[in-house]
Amino acid sequence: MYLATVALSACGGCHSSLLSSGEPLVKLLAENSLSYSYVLADQPNISPADVALVTGCIRNARDREIAVEVGRTSRKVIAVGSCAVYGGIAGARPVEPPDIRGADLPVLGEVEPIDSVMNVELYVPGCPPLPGLVLEALKSIVEGYFPLHFEGTVCSECSRRGGARKVRAWQEHPAGTDGEECLLKEGILCMGPVTRGGCRAACPVVGTACTGCRGPSDMVLSSQLHSLYTDMVRYVSLSTRSREDRTERDIARLLEYLYLFTRSDPFTRARVKEEVSP
Amino acid sequence: METERIQESTEGYTGDRVRIYPVTRIRGRADIEVSFTPNQEVVAARLRGLDFRGFEQLVAGMHAYRVPQVTSRICGSCGSFHQLASCMALEEALGCEVAPGSRAFRELLCWLWLANSHLLAITYLALPDYALPMSDAAVRNISGIYMIEDEAVNRLASAQSAFSEALSLLCAMPVHSPAVVVGGVSSVPGSDDLRKAGEILASCENDLRETMRLVEMLIKRNAEMMYTGTPYRGNYLAMTAGGSPSLLGDRIGVGSFDGEVPGDMEPGELCSSIKVEPVPWSYIAPVTLGEMSLMLVGPLARMNVGYGSDTPWAERECRSCREQWAGPLNREFFAFQGLALEVIWAWEKACMLLEGDSITSGRGFKIPEAGAGEGAALIDSPQGLLLHRATVDSKGMVDDYQVISPLQFSYNLLNEHLSEVALKIVKGIEISDVIAGRLQLAVRAFCPCIPCATH
């Protein structure tokens, strides 16, 4: 098979994650052919590929041009990372580009996930997804089997103890002090209850709040009646024995963090019932 | 390779320009622009960063405690160093002291991150140039090397997996780890995990030894062919502690490629002399330090400073390299050796920390009081000096944020060197794939990290 990797506007973390797979990746590449990849090879020109692994979001005209071409010439596309799947952190807030009149450099536009211009066969969200997940996605298409699908949430993989407890105040700091209790019980807005699992609860197990980089879980995506916000409010209210309107008031200032990685995704945004600042 | 010919006249260039896009096997997206006179003689060549990211704006208005989780996404390779520098700058702004045990754990993570990042760079980015220098572009990559020398590739992959595994064990993720937070680290692993990490590192010693020999052999074999005859000029800078390079040091070692006596300066002195000088043709804004505009940071700078006696293996390898080549290490191919040498340096440092008792398990942070203040943190990341500066208001919200990344320090030197190489090897406006490859090699020698620089 002809494989390809492409990075649009990205930090390179997803490629680092892929490369961290080590020997199995090298073997897979050697058994197949590398069609193009500016990170791995000296063949940067986009040419037909059986599988193209795309990281990064569309942020300027050049990204769009590349994405359209990749979509046109690839049989199957894997979107890797939150930027490719949801637009990612680049879309968390609008930014003003520097004045580059006459510079002939790509000009910033709206942040978009890649499926706005191409058909995507497989989505592997995460910032970045664990190395095993990226390799598994690539292998599943090359070898023709159905890849792992993580239906559960981050909480379902977390070793911390849940249960209900009243929270006096919600804190901005993302780290918890107790080694075994659920971070929500400490007043830390951990997005584990609404975020897709598959990351082995990497953040909460080391004591920091899940930032939702894997995007909404299947439950959140299952119907228009759900959204990251409404589901989070409902869960927090239940686990902190608080009324929903009270919870909404309490966590209002932390709302922005709920959509840190998904704010620019039209699909996720459509489910936002409330206004998210800024 | 895609070359684009432009005849538009801007910034004083009246002739043609050729763009080589993209530069391959580097981190991030960039192109090389070569400018010509109307007589088709080279005027200059420069590397252009093509993606503006806007992280400084992104974090302005956010709560200081949350900022490091965002700044870590500046770069996928050295993101953890951004996260750490961000935490340190904000801790200074909030007047927070980190406990010694947490500081030691942070340092351990730094060494593991550095080794992991360098091993990926050696395997996928640099090795093809040295292992298959004369091969066709279609096979000059990791798969091509694996076909003929799978043992060497497996050794590299196995060493990298060891560091990656140790990182996963200690801080959950090798990339964008969530463990480092404002006030310390979210949790310090127990002694069992630390012991296991020590065993993992011990298991890759032979792989590192063989990798070092491989790199040495490849450099000896290819040095003459790869040298463009344009040694680096200007200065090199590296963070030091007790006179030796250190990622979290307290002085800045400064030396000159002309052989002048090396000196040093306070980090504060360096910070106050930094001037960012944006250019209209690239999203990478170079910096100058007072009168100093040509400087190099990163592995080669640290190698020129020389490693300390506490890491005898790295020091021995470095000394032997200096004795062999005599004088300052000022040629492109030394960067490749620098990467391999620094993996050993990091391995020794990490083993030392894992064997010692400075890392104390348990809760690793203290939440600082939110209050107004200013802070800056200068650290040495895999690619060189990295500065984060923050101003925080009385509610703990970030007012102003600034990042200065390694490539911004080295950018003027890189472009000057690239121009010199282009003047030597580019003959006429038709740039062949081979010549374009040589120009890209000159860029790769600086280990440029574009996402960091275009933050």
Image (cartoon, rainbow, N blue to C red):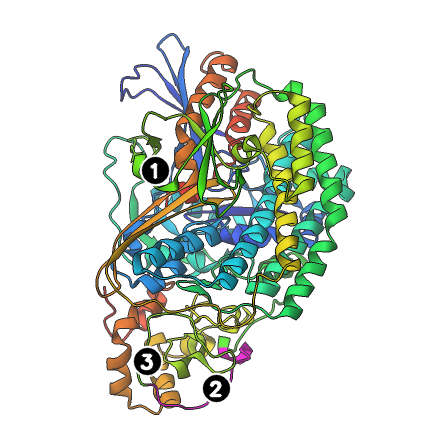
Question: Pointer 2: what residue?
Answer: A162
Q: Nearer the viewer, residue A23 or B243?
A: B243
Label pair 1/2, CB-CB below 8 angstroms: no
Q: Position of residue A17 (x, y in %)?
A: 56, 55
- In this rendering, is residue B314 above or below B291? below
Q: Which residues are magenta?
A: A155-167
Question: What label sits on residue A128 in the rendered view?
Answer: none
Q: Give coordinates of residue A172: x percent, y percent.
A: 33, 71
Please indicate whether residue A53 sits to the left or right of residue A102 in the image.
Answer: right
Q: Is residue A225 visible?
A: no
Instruction: Give how far apart the Cα atoms at labels 1 and 2 are.
Output: 50 Å
Per the image, the residue denoted by label 1 is: B269
Q: Chain of mark 1?
A: B
In percent of the image, x 25 and y 56: which residue is there?
B373
Q: Are marks 1 and 3 on the same chain?
A: no
Disc 2 secondary structure class: loop
Prevalent SS, magenta region: loop
Confirm whether circles 1 and 2 share one chain. Answer: no
- Which amino acid, by three-letter code, is at mark 3? Thr
Residue nearest the viewer, comparing A43 with A91: A91
Circle 2/circle 3 CB separation < 8 Å = no
Point out residue A90 in the picture as x, y percentages from the top left corner. 35, 54
Residue extending furthest toward the front: B242
Callout 3: few (<14), some (14-19), or many (20+) C-alpha neighbours within 10 Å? some
User: The residue marked by circle 3 belongs to what chain?
Assistant: A
How far apart in space, not on screen, are marks 1 and 3 (Cα)?
51 Å
Q: Nearer the viewer, residue B243 or B285?
A: B243
- Disc 2 residue crowd, few under 14, some 14–19, many 20+, Cα 10 Å: some
Report helix, strand or loop for mark 1.
helix
